[in-house]
Image (tube, rainbow, N blue to C red):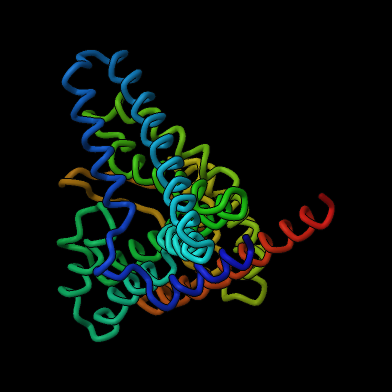
Amino acid sequence: MSVLILAALLIDLLVGDPRCLPHPVVLMGSLIQKCEALIRKTATDATALRIGGVLLVIAVCTVTYFITQGLIWLAGTVHPWLGLAVHLWLLSTTLAVKSLHQHARAVAEPLARGDIVTARQKVSLIVGRDCENLNEREITRATVETVAENTVDGIVSPLFYAFIGGAPLAMTYKAINTMDSMIGHRHQDYLYLGWAAARLDDLANYLPARLAGVFYSFLSIGSPGGFTSTVRAVLRDAPAHPSPNSGIPEAAVAGALGIQLGGTNYYRGEASHRPFMGKEKYPLTYRHIQQALHLTYGVTALTVLAGVLVRFVLESRF
C-alpha cells in the first residue's frame, strides 16, 4: 500500500487533475445535489431536515466507498495490473498538491507584477469571501489561509485515510469533505440539512489537522517565525477559530512565517470577523504565498514518511 500511495502522490505532482479525465468529486457533487433535492421534496421542518441530512451523509459515504471498492475489484478481475492501475488513479484523485500549488501561484504571480485586478480574479476562484476590493495584503492573507487549510483537507487527510484503508477510505473522506463544502456551511438554508455533514467533516479532520500542526511545528525550526512562535500560535490562537480544525494549520503557518492571519472578511457584503492567528513580525507580502507552499511540501513529505513508517512497523509485527 505504501508504494501505491507514493506512486499516487507522484502522479498528482506530475499530472495533477487532467481535464480530459472525469474527476470523482464532480460525480460526488452530482450525487449530493440529487440527494438534497430528494430530501427537500419531503422534509419541511428542522427535525426532518436533520434526519434527511444524516441519511444523505450515510448514503453518499456508503455509495462512494463501495463503488470505489467495486471499481478496483472489477478491474482486478480483468487483470491484476489493471486493478492496481485503477486503484492508483483513484488514489491520485484524492490528492491536491499540484492543484493547490497552481492556484496559489496563479495569485502570487500577478501580485509580483503589481497586477491587483488579475490577482483578485484568481483568488476569487479559491476563496468564498468577497474579493472585489481586496488589496495586496488581503489577497495574500486569503491565499495563505487557503493554502494552510487545504494542506489538511487536500493532502494530509486524504493521505491519512489512504494509509489506513487505501483508495476506498480516502475517497470516502473526499466525499465527506465535498458534502461539507456543499451543504455544511452555516447559511440558513443548510443550518439543519448540513449539520451532519459539517460535524462528520470536523470529526474526519480532527486527527489529521493535529498531525499537521505537529509537522508544521517541526518544520518551523529555523523558519522566519521560529519554533516557539509556531507552537504558541497553535496553542493560543487555534482554539479561537470557529472551526475546530482549520485554526491549527492557519495558526501554525502564521507562527512559522512570523505573520498574522485572520481579521475581517466580507461575504455578500456582510462583515465576518475571524480571530487573529499569530503575531505579526513581518508585513504580509506576496512572497509569503510561496513560503506557505514550501511548508505545504514539507508537511506532505512528513505525512508520507510517517505513514510509511507506521505501516512498516505494523506490518512487521502482524
Is residue 31 shown left or right of residue 63?
left
Number of labelled discs?
0
Residue 290 screen position, x and y as percent: 43, 77
Nearer the observer, 143 or 181: 181
In which image quadrant can residue 66 be found? top left
User: In the displayed structure, does residue 64 sit left or right of residue 47?
Assistant: right
Picture coordinates of residue 115, whole percent (x, y): 19, 80
- Residue 219 image point, x, y percent: 63, 70
Check the image and report above or below for 267 versus 115. Answer: above
Out of 60 and 181, give the one closest to the viewer.
Answer: 60
Tell me if 241 is positioned left or right of 209 in this view. Answer: left
User: Which residue of the protein is positioned furthest toward the right in this rendering?
Assistant: 317
Q: Which x, y percent locates residue 76?
A: 50, 56
Of 213 and 78, nearer the camera is 78
- Residue at 44 percent of width and 46 percent of height: 70
Q: Is residue 229 left or right of residue 54?
A: right
The picture quadrant where one finds residue 289 is bottom left
Residue reaching furthest to the front: 78
Residue found 62% across the figure and 60% down from its top: 1
Pick whichever, 185 or 130, lies toward us: 185
Q: Could one spot residue 156 in this view of the protein?
A: yes
Above or below 31: residue 10: below
Residue at left 62%, top 49%?
164
